[in-house]
Amino acid sequence: MIDYFIFDLSRTVMMILATLIFAWVSYKRRDLVSWLFAYIAVTFSEIFRLVSQEEYDLFELISITFSALSVILIIIAVSIEYFQTFHKTSITKTNPLILILLVTFSQLFYFGLQLIIGVLVLIAIILIIRVYSNKRTPTHAFLCFILICGLLNLIAALLNQGGIEGAEEFYQFTNTIMTTILLITGVVALIEDRLVRSEKSYRMAYNRAEFYKDLFVHDINNILQNLQFSLEIMSQNLEGYEKKEELDELVKIAKNQVNRGAELGLNVKKLSDLEMGAIKNEPIEIYNVLEQIITDIKIKFSEEEIKIDIIGDRDKIYVNANILLEDVIRIILNNAIRYNDNPIKEISIQISKKVKDFGSDIKIEFIDNGVGIPDIMKKTIFQPVYKKTKDFKRIGLGLLLANEVIRNISGKIWVEDKVQGDHTQGSNVIILIPEAYGILDIER
């Protein structure tokens, strides 16, 4: 008797462990949630069977009820899995299955409940085998084994009720095997989830590397073509050049392309550092950063007439960001000047605070009088990075860097029209950055 109790206790502990593992897997993999209910029912069945003192007492009856419920839940889980896998199946293909189920249920008045459940389990085995043939995952292979063991367990229960010699041992054996496979299935599903996540991570890293490579090659080719074009014109007409202005313009184009190449290399390095987590967030005082960048921008575009105003209360404002925030601001201001045909490039930088339920964001708006951005482009230039790796006209490496930096510091970036409904009047690039706390109080 003690040996049976230890045996039942081991099986119950194993089933509880299997359910806990499968619950964790189901939290990670939502496609397995329907199976979790069957696990829970089996666990309760084992627990009540363990505390049962005599044959067909209250606890054993509850155990039998949960056991029957677990079979029904498994059949439901298989049905859900089947229709989720083959949801595009036509009505004509699913009609035979529906007819089989209807006929099976109609036999309830002629056959015993256990026989009906057995037929349903057989149908469930056929369905899960077909699901496995489509998905080909180890988890679904073990789910097939669970159903086969369930069928064997049901047969053993029928033999045991018929008083067949050795049926009790066969029933205990199939019950133990089923519990073991339930545990193994949870472990396999957990390992499979880890492998799938690792595969997705490596695939994303591969896509990212391919994106950087293709975009880098694309931009470098453009830069080299512009340089080649400028140098060919200069070499063909150098001897006959009388207009120094035209020569200076070609030299200016060449220098700009060289600068673009240098910026491109630096941006690739910064993106790589950002993805690897080598750049950490820290409190940054926004006004100091803006004033320094504006000074550098005016030196860089010294031949242009630029007017940049900062609108705000001028109190020190710290944001939780990293050093690449400076690059984001430079990219926005560079674009506002480069894509601007007006003799005077006007940019208004407006800073305000947006209070949330927990904390607040600093809102920075860069309003220019440039050529603007059409509505169709507004929806794509700040899309997630790796959706269209070949669409280089949609997003440049500068905007890519800006998008990734803001996303990395839990901020947002988007663009609106300066004048609502008329993009030709200029753009308003808006970024939201979480405010940093504690620094301002220490300063004061």
Image (spheres, helix red, strand yellow):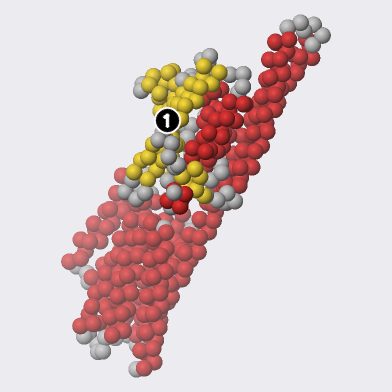
Q: Against 283, is 239 above or below?
A: above
Give the residue at x 43% y 75%.
Answer: 180
Q: Residue furthest right?
A: 239
Q: Against 407, is 306 above or below?
A: above
Residue 76 occupies which quadrant of the picture?
bottom left
Q: x, y percentage for residue 32? A: 38, 60
The type of residue carrying mark 1 is Ile
Side of 422 where 337 appears, left or right: right
Give the residue at x 46% y 30%.
Answer: 310
**What kind of element bears circle 1?**
strand
Side of 214 where 12 appears, left or right: left
Q: Against 225, is 244 above or below?
A: above
State the residue in front, 371 or 366: 366
Does the image show residue 174?
no
Give the residue at x 64% y 42%.
Answer: 269
Q: x, y percentage for residue 256? A: 66, 24
State the residue in front, 54 or 332: 332
State the residue in front, 389 or 9: 389
Q: x, y percentage for residue 391? A: 54, 31
Side of 416 where 339 appears, left or right: right
Give the residue at x 42% y 21%.
Answer: 423
State the residue in front, 114 or 325: 325
Residue 36 occupies which quadrant of the picture?
bottom left
Q: Against 402, is 112 above or below?
A: below
Q: Residue furthest bottom?
A: 1
Q: Which quarter of the rendered picture does the N terminus lie within?
A: bottom left
Residue marked by disc 1: 311
Residue 378 occupies which quadrant of the picture?
top left
Does the image show residue 419?
yes
Side of 161 where 246 appears, left or right: right
Q: x, y percentage for residue 377? A: 46, 27
